[in-house]
Amino acid sequence: MRILISALPLNLNIIEILIHMFNLAVLIVAVRFLLYKPIKKFMEKRAAEYRTADEETRKKLQEAEEFNENSKKLLDEARREAVSIADSTSASAREQADEIVTEAKEKAEGILERAYEDIRLKTEEETRGLKHAISELAVTLASEILEKEVTAEDNDKAIDDILNKWEHRS
Amino acid sequence: MFEALSSKFTDFWVEQYRDAFGGGMSSLGDAVREAINPELVKLGAIEVDPAIFTAFGVTVVIILAALIIRILVIPRFKKYPRGLQLMLESIVSYFDKSAEHAVHRHASFVGPYTFTAALFISLGTLAELLGLRPSFASVNTCFAMGLTTFLVINICGIGEKKIGGRLKRYLNPIHLITDLSVPLSLSLRLFGAILSGFIIAELLYAVIALSFVLPAAAAVITTIVHAFLQAYLFATLTNIFVGEAVE
């Protein structure tokens, strides 16, 4: 022991070194358990709390973004539906209008046709009546003038000739 | 050889002083000799450097401060740190992050060690401001620090690579030399730096003409800066050496 203490240069003393090492070991253990670990534990706990809060915030933000996305989708769908409804409504209105117009045209054409037919029939009837009246008048006149009996056949022939001439003239 | 060197060193300073002040100042040499080779004191059956009492004192102060902080300050820690809490959290966080960056999974073991070592070196050196002999003016304290770091390096190295893996490294004898030089370089760097500052301060105090105002200014460089610089260097080098051992 004495050799260890006195024989070394620079006043080196192994016992003293060992005492210092023991002193340092005690200090390390004390500082670790009294100061370092509790402070680190506190910081880690706080960091974990911040992490949790951060995660929750991120989660909520994600949820809000998803909600926003869904809302946008719904809004887009609603817009598209509104546009399609408007389109289909105007198309059916146009269709109905077209139908009404077509129907009206058809009706008008029918009315016109019927009117033309009526006119034609009435013209024919009037022509026949006029023919008959003229022939009666002609027979009467001819009998008066000729003072002889004109047969109905002669009369008809004469009238037809006259009418044909008129038709040709007109 | 060391004594011869220290004698030459003190003679040089005595000569310088004589040239400057023209008088005989034998106490200057005595002051330097006292700084390098102090009178040993009894600790039980052995004679020890008086710096050991500073080391004990610093240890007691640190443990008491840690106890007070643990009981009175830490339970009142707030979510948003301020003042003392901010300072404590910043220091612990710095050492923890440094250790984590350098030694990864061994950080929970190395972080408290570098933190304690830095605290011990700082306060052990700053004790000089109270007129005490700094703990690290004794080569024994410095060797104790160097050897403890050597132990920490090897514990982490073996923990990471097992004994076989660690021994395999020494197949290359260069590694043996570099590993053995670690405690030496750490110890002697600390010893040289702290002792040199201490000697300068002792010289300034020994000369009456210089012992006013100047020591206060010089103490900033020779003691305060040294204390934090050496603490920082020691912690950083420990992280680097342990990092090398576990990589």
Image: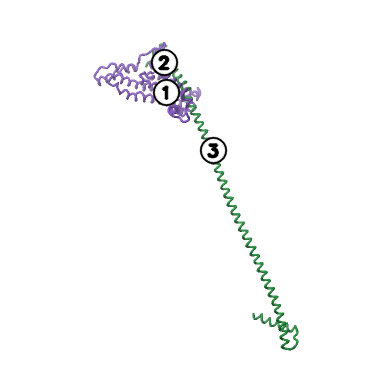
**What amino acid is found at the position of numbered circle 1 in the picture?**
Leu
- In the rendered image, residue B210, in percent from the top left (x then y), is placed at 28, 21
Q: Which residue is the site of mark 3?
A: A60
**Nearest the eye: A19 or B5:** A19
Which chain is in purple here?
B
Whether residue A63 is situated above or below residue A158 in the rendered picture:
above
Residue extending farthest left: B22
**What amino acid is found at the position of numbered circle 2 in the picture?**
Glu
Q: Which chain does tag 3 point to?
A: A
- In the rendered image, residue B103, in percent from the top left (x then y), is placed at 47, 27
What residue lies at 66% left-to-right and 67% top-to-bottom? A111
Q: Which residue is the site of mark 1?
A: B119
Let me know if marks 3 and 1 both belong to one chain: no
Circles 2 and 1, Cβ within 8 Å, touching? The answer is no
Whether residue A91 is situated above or below residue A20 in the rendered picture:
below
Q: Which residue is the site of mark 2?
A: A16
**What amino acid is found at the position of numbered circle 3 in the picture?**
Lys
Whether residue A19 is situated above or below residue A54 in the rendered picture:
above
**Nearest the eye: B191 or B78:** B78
The quarter of the picture where the N terminus of chain B appears is top left
Let me know if marks 3 and 2 both belong to one chain: yes
